Image (cartoon, rainbow, N blue to C red):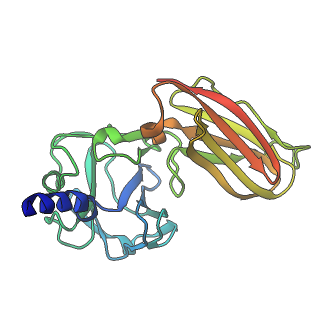
Amino acid sequence: MKLVRLFTMLAVMAPTFLFSQVKINEVLFSSTGNQVELKNFGSSSVDVSNWWFCTLFDYTRVGALPVLSGELNIPAGGILALSGIGLNDNSADLGLYNSGSFGSTTAMEDFLQWGGGGQGRESVAVSKGIWTAGDFAAAPADGHSLEYDGDGNAAGDWFDQDNPTIGSDNGVVTSVDDDGPAVPNGFSLAQNYPNPFNPSTQINYAIPATGSVQLEIFNVLGARVRTLVNQTQAAGNYSVRWDGRSDRSTLAATGVYLYRLQIGNQVDMKRMLFIK
């Protein structure tokens, strides 16, 4: 009975001591400079200033890299974007460590490899149980990124993103239409395009004055799938591109979803169809 209780307790504790709450969230490959994004999926802040990246036996301390956005002491739910790391977009790996013990499963926090061929730290990740031997994400094109879908530790949990979202939530790209009217005449929410869509769609909206903006996606049962925008925005025409692959664990195979825009007391909602 005591052994049963012990194994049960270890099973409950396993995610805490085996798997990191800070994970590699996006890797951007660019001839003008590579970038890496870390996300804290946990409920408490984590200082990663003395953590390390290892890629093809090139070791770089996280705190020594230029910070694009975020803080080295990553708050719960926070994102840290970094530049200056050397990467090979054809075939490489990237390990994240909490110390310089690069052969240690305890020190390894996360791991990703892409392309093909044997990589430097795959064996450590396999021993830790966060990767499968011989598993490779597809190598991305120049200017694209590999984005994590937030669920799992396999190559299939990474997808090629042609509109990198370094510094913000995966799968969401927001832009302002500088060619539109300086001040829109009124509040409006357009039908997403394309619709139906797979894997991504674009949502356009306009706001006539500075205000608090919320753009959210819900399933037909009313459960929120994703918050695309939750911030104060100036008057203007906005476009948000959402890639459904970033939320695939919560999406039905094919289904109707609602997107809801609220600015102050004004609310509008429309339907869209996600297909697989």
User: Is the N terminus in the top left, top right, bottom left or bottom right quadrant?
Assistant: bottom left
Towards the viewer: 250 or 174: 250
Q: Identify the residue at horizontal 72%, vertical 30% (top origin).
A: 191
Towards the viewer: 177 or 215: 215
> Which of the 4 quarters of the picture holds residue 267?
top right
Q: Is residue 160 above or below residue 254?
A: below
Find residue 273 and report its horizontal and vertical position in percent.
59, 25
Q: Is residue 247 above or below residue 62?
A: above
> Which of the 4 quarters of the picture holds residue 253?
top left
Direction right: furthest residue: 185
Q: Is residue 185 left or right of residue 263?
A: right
Q: Is residue 245 visible?
A: no
Towards the viewer: 179 or 262: 262
Q: Identify the residue at horizontal 85%, vertical 43% (top origin).
A: 187
Find residue 227 and report its horizontal and vertical position in percent.
60, 49
Find residue 97 and report its horizontal and vertical position in percent.
26, 66
Q: Identify the residue at horizontal 88%, vertical 49% (top origin).
A: 183
Q: Identify the residue at horizontal 24%, vertical 59% (top origin).
A: 12
Q: Is residue 218 left or right of residue 27?
A: right
Direction front: furthest residue: 1
> Which of the 4 quarters of the picture holds residue 190?
top right
Q: Is residue 261 left or right of residue 236?
A: left
Q: Is residue 174 left or right of residue 154?
A: right
Q: How many marks?
A: 0
Find residue 30 and report its horizontal and vertical position in percent.
44, 49
Q: Is residue 204 visible?
A: yes
